[in-house]
Amino acid sequence: MPRRTTAHPYRTLTQLDHYLGALDIQLTPERFALLSEVSAVPLGVPHEAIAGSLGSIQGGDTSRVIAPVAQVG
């Protein structure tokens, strides 16, 4: 049976200190929004095509369509 190993994002105690120190970062709502915007992943087909057609669904009354919120990450 093969031996299992656990992968860690650090190799030294200094790296571990930096890694754990990153948990103390607090972002302002503006910075969080900016990071969310620039790191957004395009949903691709068929999601973008569906989003583009919402204006023609229900005779153009998009208030009758509840679009699901898809969060990435």
Image (cartoon, helix red, strand yellow):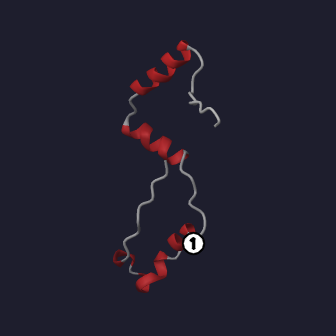
Residues packed near mark 1 inside 10 Å, few (<14), some (14 to 19) or many (20 plus):
few
Q: Residue at x 50, y 48 (%)?
A: 37
Q: Vertically, is 20 above or below 31?
A: above
Q: Quadrant of residue 12?
A: top right
Residue at numbered disc 1: 49
23 displayed left or right of 42: left
As drawn, is 29 to the left or to the right of 45? left
**Image check: 10 left or right of 27?**
right
* Quarter of the figure that contains the N terminus: top right
Q: Identify the residue at horizontal 52%, vertical 73% (top origin).
A: 50
> Going 38% across and 29% down the picture, which residue do you hit?
26
Q: Quadrant of residue 43?
A: bottom right
Percent across and percent down for residue 15 are 55, 17
Q: Position of residue 55 (x, y in %)?
A: 47, 77
Tally the marks.
Answer: 1
Determine the residue located farthest toward the front in the rendered image.
Answer: 1
Q: Position of residue 39 (x, y in %)?
A: 55, 45
**Residue drawn 48% across and 16% down?**
17
Residue 69 is situated, as x and y percent measured from the top left of the image, at 41, 61
**Closer to us: 13 or 67:** 13
Classify mark 1: helix, strand or loop: helix
Q: Is residue 19 above or below residue 44?
A: above
